[in-house]
Amino acid sequence: MGNSHSGRHHRKNRHGAAAPTFNHGLPPPNQNQNQNQDQNQNQNQNQTTTAPAICLPYAHVDSSLRALAGQAEGFGRFAMGGFHGQLYHVITLSDDGPGSLRDGCRKKEPLWIVFEVSGTIQLQSYLSVSSHKTIDGRGQRIKLSGKGLRLKECEHVIVCNLEFEGGRGHDVDGIQIKPKSKHIWIDRCSLRDYDDGLIDITRESTDITISRCHFSQHDKTMLIGADPSHIGDRCIRVTIHHCFFDGTRQRHPRVRYGKVHLYNNYTRNWGIYAVCASVEAQIYSQCNIYEAADKKIAFKYLTEKFGFGNTIF
């Protein structure tokens, strides 16, 4: 009897190794065909390298670690993070010191920060992130607690796949973006239970995208625009997409001034309102789902005094 598959046609996968084509019930090949098959296989083995025949599960996936850069959508789409820098390996969960996350974030040169450890980093103070940094938590489970990230007067920062939980203290936010920071992308992060906000974007910070994040167990979720006196916040531009606001009480987001594009977000079980706009806010809400309980307000407008109180909107 012949073999269960035919050697007549051989495909090559992306690494050059021959892959058989099954005949799915067709008559078995004759002896001459089997001999030809053996010869073809020997030729293919001589021509191919020793690389294993591994196919990535999705055609669009790039095997390069830094393929993440440049994939942001919306206003933060130009964020490149530490694309042009060296790899920095976090090897300790200590708050500071060589090999710590804080040590990498404070360096002035571009860096792509990756983690060799998993666990909780207990921050004793705000973790300031300098320009041209990527904090890439993919492949590990990293939780930041105690305090949060501070993006102050920086640009081109990417934060991916981190957990933020249990921030304590006055004015302690999970991620604080102020002042005058730009080209920021926060992607696939989980944020909950901080004493102030989960993400604050204020004081002329702009060109920012928040995507695929999970917000839960919190009151004041996301503030965009500091207060009515900060008219410089008119420059703010933020995109929020594919985020899950899960039982958070308010500010999904709360917007003053600036332009905010919301799309493909899912908000449920909020307490006061889902989205709130006030002085000069421009919100474009597109393809979002708002699952409210009884008598809950999805969109709220608050009248606030503009600038120094001369005009009321």
Image: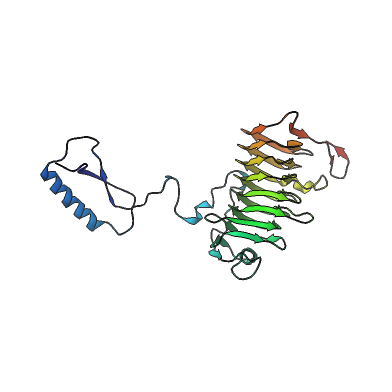
Q: Quadrant of residue 214?
A: top right
Location of the C terminus by quadrant is: top right
Q: Nearer the viewer, residue 83 or 25?
A: 25
Q: Is residue 210 above or below residue 293?
A: below
Q: Residue at x 17, y 48 (%)?
A: 37
Residue 270 makes an appearance in the image: yes
Residue 127 percent location from the top left of the image: 68, 61
The answer to whether 33 appears left or right of 90 in the picture is left
Q: Residue at x 62, y 45 (%)?
A: 213
Residue 202 percent location from the top left of the image: 74, 50
Residue occupying the far top of the picture: 295
Residue 21 percent location from the top left of the image: 25, 42
Q: Is residue 86 above or below residue 202?
A: below
Residue 155 percent location from the top left of the image: 64, 56
Location of the N terminus by quadrant is: top left
Residue 130 makes an appearance in the image: no
Q: Residue at x 65, y 48 (%)?
A: 207
Residue occupying the far bottom of the picture: 98
Q: Nearer the viewer, residue 178 or 245?
A: 245
Q: How is the image coloured?
A: rainbow
Q: Is residue 207 above or below residue 148?
A: above
Q: Quadrant of residue 112?
A: bottom right
